[in-house]
Image (cartoon, rainbow, N blue to C red):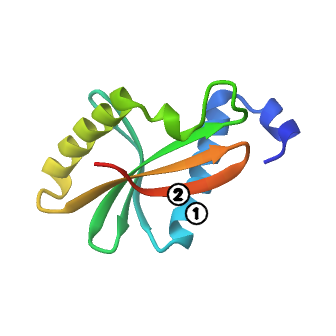
Amino acid sequence: MNRAERGQMNRAERGRAGEDAAALLLQAHGYRIVARNVRLPGGEIDIIARDGDTVVFVEVKARASGTYGSAVRAVDARKRATLRALANDWLQIAAPRARARFDVVTYDRGRATLHRGAFA
């Protein structure tokens, strides 16, 4: 997506476009997308995928500039705690015995990076 296109999109549209691109990136790495934008009490999980036998909870973050820090730094301790709690709730219902992992897909100035096992 070029700068002109980003400028014409609202925040929700940019977020959706980033998550669409992240899903394609994950699929290119062999992941199978299970669900997207899973809303639970307390928040939302951007993408739930399978990487082999592992359930992967994926947070997608983007930064167009370095003004507010890198995209990966935006997944701070508070966000990680929220994601852990949401993942725990989802696992209890959908896959109580599954092995789980947290990955982050970041976009810094248009460059996509997959961070496998970004946090525990």
Q: Give the SS element for disc 2.
A: strand
The quarter holding residue 24 reads bottom right
Q: Nearer the viewer, residue 27 or 64?
A: 64
Q: Amino acid at mark 1?
A: Leu
29 left or right, relative to 14 = left
For the point 66% across and 43% down, which residue is it? 108
Image depth: mark 2 or mark 1 in front: 2
102 is higher (above) or lower (below) than 76 = below
Q: Give the SS element for disc 1.
A: helix
For the point 81% across and 31% down, which residue is it? 7
Q: What whole-number distance in Å separates the C-alpha atoms at marks 2 and 1?
A: 8 Å
10 left or right, relative to 43 = right
The quarter holding residue 15 reads top right
Q: Which mark is residue 90?
A: none
6 left or right, relative to 41 = right
In the picture as drawn, the residue positioned furthest to the right comes out as 4
Q: How many marks?
A: 2
For the point 45% across and 35% down, which residue is it? 75
Decide: marks 2, 1 in contact (CB < 8 A)? yes
Look at mark 2 in the image and give the residue it sits on: 114
Q: Which mark is residue 25?
A: 1
69 is higher (above) or lower (below) than 59 = above
Q: Position of residue 11 (x, y in %)?
A: 65, 29
Q: Position of residue 79 (x, y in %)?
A: 37, 31
25 left or right, relative to 48 = right
Q: Amino acid at mark 2?
A: Leu
The disc, 2 or 1, on the residue closer to the chain's N-terminal end is 1
For the point 78% across and 36% down, which residue is it? 6
Q: Position of residue 107 (x, y in %)?
A: 63, 46
